[in-house]
Amino acid sequence: MSTTISLAGQVALVTGAATGIGAAIARTLAHAGATVVVNHLRRHAYADGVVRAIREAGGHATAFEADVKDAHAVADMVTWTEREFGRVDIAVQSAGVIQEKPFLETTEADWDFVVDTDLKGIFLCCRAVLPGMVRRGRGCVINIASELGLLGRASYAPYCAAKAGVIGITRALAREFAPAIRVNAIAPGPVDTPMLSVEHMSPEVLEAERAIPAERVGQPEEIAATALFLASDLASFYYGQVLGPNGGAHMG
Ligand SMILES: NC(=O)c1ccc[n+]([C@@H]2O[C@H](COP(=O)([O-])OP(=O)(O)OC[C@H]3O[C@@H](n4cnc5c(N)ncnc54)[C@H](O)[C@@H]3O)[C@@H](O)[C@H]2O)c1
């Protein structure tokens, strides 16, 4: 087995890839040789920036706007990708939203927004890409969960529930589609992205994010490295696993 990770000739679809972890994963997979579809929602300038950076580095990428909560938009995106590039070999679900709100103030609309984006979005994307992977007898699915799906956190009930659900759907699909298709999840710890911005988080939460063995938040590239590993043949024996690049925030 070669230890050089090459994804040459493979097609990767990365959701939420205009910013943060998704953007780093798109850049990293493209650097390894994959053609990457950079999904985004109303982030044209950022998505175009990711595509431009990939192309300037000699890689192949195209942006595609689709709301992962919208079944038709997701189906259109996958149909377009399969028509344009022949298939989806690697599907990475990184699109997500977060909301900090005391549980007793959480409305049904809050719940629907977070759970529809973070969990139903993964259901819709997996349902759209898996038929082609089954037809071709191979494929790799990587779902971005969160350490908060394992640990829980006060004032984040919808997010924690959705991310625990991401782990559940990952394990169910891993069993249902093995051995041809590998489905795994990544549950990052705190990562320096627009989602974990000082503007959106209370000082208490930011302090908690930094109070981990690594004594710092992670960088998006550190999560992308895990995605690259899972997408590669080096991870050929990984099924239904939840890898935790989290600075030690959660162990086990
Ligand atoms: N940053 C962290 O500390 C952290 C920790 C654990 C898990 N995560 C997870 O990592 C993933 C990426 O988050 P991030 O930290 O890079 O934040 P981010 O806000 O930079 O990335 C999320 C992206 O998803 C996009 N998005 C939101 N709703 C969408 C929709 N309906 N359709 C398509 N795209 C949509 C956003 O526009 C954004 O570009 C998320 O699933 C998040 O829950 C983040």
Image: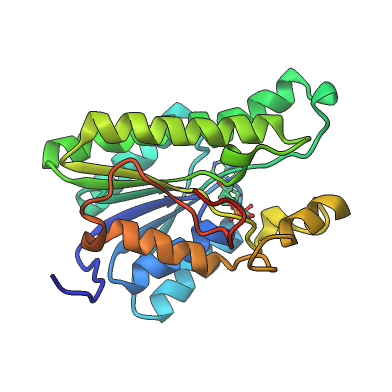
Is 130 situated above or below 65? above
Q: How is the image coloured?
A: rainbow
Residue 169 drawn at (x, y percent): 41, 30
Is residue 165 visible in the rendered structure shown here? yes
Where on the picture, by quarter, is residue 110? top right
Left or right relative to 234: residue 54 = right
Left or right relative to 111: residue 244 = left
Where on the picture, by quarter, is residue 100? top right
The outermost residue toward the front is 252
Residue 66 drawn at (x, y percent): 49, 41
The outermost residue toward the top is 108
Is 29 situated above or below 11? below
Is residue 202 visible in the rendered structure shown here? no
Residue 153 drawn at (x, y percent): 71, 39
Left or right relative to 205: residue 87 = left
Is 39 situated above or below 56? above
Is 241 situated above or below 171? below
What residue is at 51 percent from the left and 69 percent from the top?
A: 221
* 241, 184: nearer the viewer: 241
What residue is at 78 percent from the left and 35 percent from the top?
A: 155
What residue is at 46 percent from the left and 36 percent from the top?
A: 167
Left or right relative to 197: residue 182 = left
What residue is at 12 percent from the left and 42 percent from the top?
A: 136
- Location of the N terminus by quadrant is bottom left
Q: How many marks?
A: 0
* 234, 192: nearer the viewer: 234
Residue 245 drawn at (x, y percent): 51, 59
